[in-house]
Each structure stands twice: as structure tokens, then as C-alpha cells.
């Protein structure tokens, strides 16, 4: 287990990663509103705005009053719903550490489209893994998995400061800490049943991110950069 804290990679093209800041801010705002009860009962919000495979594929329907948005639209709303402080804190930490440099390498608008595409791909992978499941998928981890693999493809040699086993502070090359994290998600998705963690959403985000990064990065931000930080 590796918890990233700082990467030290400088911004080269943008003064501020405004889209990354906005995504973090929106996620935190929604979580605070949910925690304060402003948006209503948390469980109802999870069901209404989370992506439920059985409902998306018409194997089931939501109870009356829960269908706030058309079910396909939950592919976009579910990444902004988090179930606990630990859930959102972990996701936002990854987004804070890695998202700014990915936005810098892609440009803000392309990064925004990339983020949502990875989130949708993650949700679809989760649903396809168990189409009859009635458990809602919530959280930004599918989108953030795409950001993680994009960072790995762009900056594999950058050393990331983090906590190994959540305890030991070390600087580790991205190719090792993020490559290991991605491998863990794939193995977990293939070997774990009935987990509360949406491992298939992570895998879907990784696949989408790996496919889109070569298409969306700036020509001046080459893949597999040799720069160190």
C-alpha cells in the first residue's frame, strides 16, 4: 500500500491547474452538503445518483421518488458521491498529487474531457462485471485511476514522496509505486468477490486512461518523459 503525498514535478505550460482545483472543490462541496444533510438522506442519494448496474441495464427499476436523473446520467453523477471521509480523502489526495501535472500535459479542456471519460469507463466496467448487481457505484476512483495511469505514462521516472504501508516515508519512482498500485487493482478485480471497493471501476478507468493519454497529451509533453524531479 502506497499513499502519495507529493511528487515535485513542476508545471510547464499552465500557471494554475484550474480544472483540477475545480474538480477537487466540487467533490468536497458535494461531500460537505451530503454530510450536513442538505441534499437529503445519504442512502437515498447513493441510490439516486450512484450507478446501479441492474437499473442501468434494465434488469431492475428504482423505487418511486429515487429516479432523480435518468439512469445513464448517473455515469456522470456517481463520481461526485462519496460514502465517508476516508473515501473522499483518499481519492482527492491522489487527484491533488497527480491531476495537476496531467492537466498541464493535456491542457485544461482536454483534461476535463479525459477525467469524465475515465469516470464513465470505470462505471461501465463495474456494471459489465456484474450486470444484475443492485449495489450502487459511488466515488471518483474510476476517473482518478485514469489520471494515475496517465501520470505513469507521462512521468514514469518522477520520484513520488509517499508512505509505504501508510507508515514509512519514501521517495519512489512513479513506475514502481503507481505501476504496483495499478497491478494491485487488476489482481484484486480478478480475485475478489463481493467487495465494497469497485475494483472493476478502477480497471475500467486505467484502460480508458491508457488509451486516451497518447491521443490527448501535448506534443511538447512527450510520453515516458526522462525528466526527474
Image (cartoon, rainbow, N blue to C red):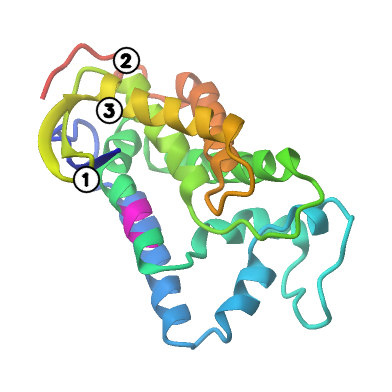
- Where does the image place residue 100, in percent across and percent down from the top left? 28, 42
Expressed as whole percent of the image width and height from the top left, the position of residue 113 reads 52, 42
> What is the secondary structure assignment of the residue under circle 1?
loop
Q: Measure how far apart labels 2 and 3 are at the Cα level.
A: 21 Å
Q: Which of marks 1 and 3 precedes in the sequence?
A: 1
Observer-nearest of 204 and 29: 204
Q: Which of marks 3 and 1 is in front?
A: 1
Identify whether 214 is placed above or below 42: above
Is 89 situated left or right of 145 in this image?
Answer: left
- Quadrant of the rendering where the C terminus is positioned: top left
Name the residue that disc number 2 marks.
222
Chain part drawn in magenta? 88-92
> Which residue matches tag 1?
166
Query: CA separation, marks 3 and 1?
Result: 12 Å
Give the image location of residue 39, x and y in percent. Answer: 54, 84
Marks 3/1 in contact by CB < 8 Å: the verdict is no
Q: What residue sits right under mark 3 in the picture?
A: 177
Looking at the rendered image, the disc whose residue lies closer to the viewer, 2 or 3, is 3
Mark 3 secondary-structure assignment: helix
Q: Main secondary structure of the magenta part?
A: helix
Work out whether mark 2 precedes mark 3 in sequence or the reverse, and give the earlier one. Answer: 3
Amino acid at each position: 500500500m502506497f499513499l502519495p503525498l507529493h511528487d515535485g514535478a513542476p508545471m510547464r505550460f499552465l500557471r494554475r491547474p484550474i480544472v483540477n482545483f475545480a474538480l477537487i472543490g466540487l467533490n468536497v462541496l458535494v461531500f460537505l452538503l451530503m454530510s450536513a444533510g442538505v441534499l437529503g438522506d445519504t442512502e437515498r442519494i447513493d441510490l439516486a445518483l450512484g450507478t446501479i448496474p441492474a437499473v442501468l441495464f434494465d434488469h431492475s427499476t428504482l423505487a418511486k421518488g429515487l429516479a432523480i436523473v435518468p439512469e445513464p446520467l448517473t455515469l456522470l453523477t456517481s463520481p461526485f458521491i462519496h460514502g465517508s471521509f476516508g473515501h473522499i480523502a483518499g481519492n482527492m489526495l491522489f487527484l491533488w498529487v497527480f491531476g495537476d501535472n496531467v492537466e498541464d500535459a493535456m491542457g485544461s479542456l482536454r483534461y476535463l474531457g479525459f477525467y469524465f471519460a475515465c469516470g464513465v469507463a470505470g462505471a461501465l466496467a463495474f456494471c459489465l462485471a456484474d450486470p444484475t448487481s443492485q449495489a450502487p457505484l459511488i466515488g471518483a476512483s474510476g476517473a482518478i485511476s485514469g489520471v494515475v495511469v496517465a501520470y505513469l505514462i507521462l512521468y514514469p521516472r518522477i520520484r513520488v514522496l509517499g508512505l509505504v504501508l501508510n507508515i514509512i516515508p519514501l521517495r519512489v519512482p512513479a513506475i514502481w509505486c503507481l505501476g504496483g498500485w495499478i497491478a494491485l487493482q487488476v489482481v484484486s478485480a480478478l480475485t475478489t468477490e463481493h467487495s465494497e471497493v469497485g475494483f472493476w471501476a478502477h480497471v475500467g478507468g486505467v484502460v480508458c486512461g491508457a488509451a486516451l493519454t497518447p491521443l490527448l497529451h501535448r506534443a511538447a509533453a512527450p510520453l515516458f518523459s526522462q525528466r526527474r524531479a
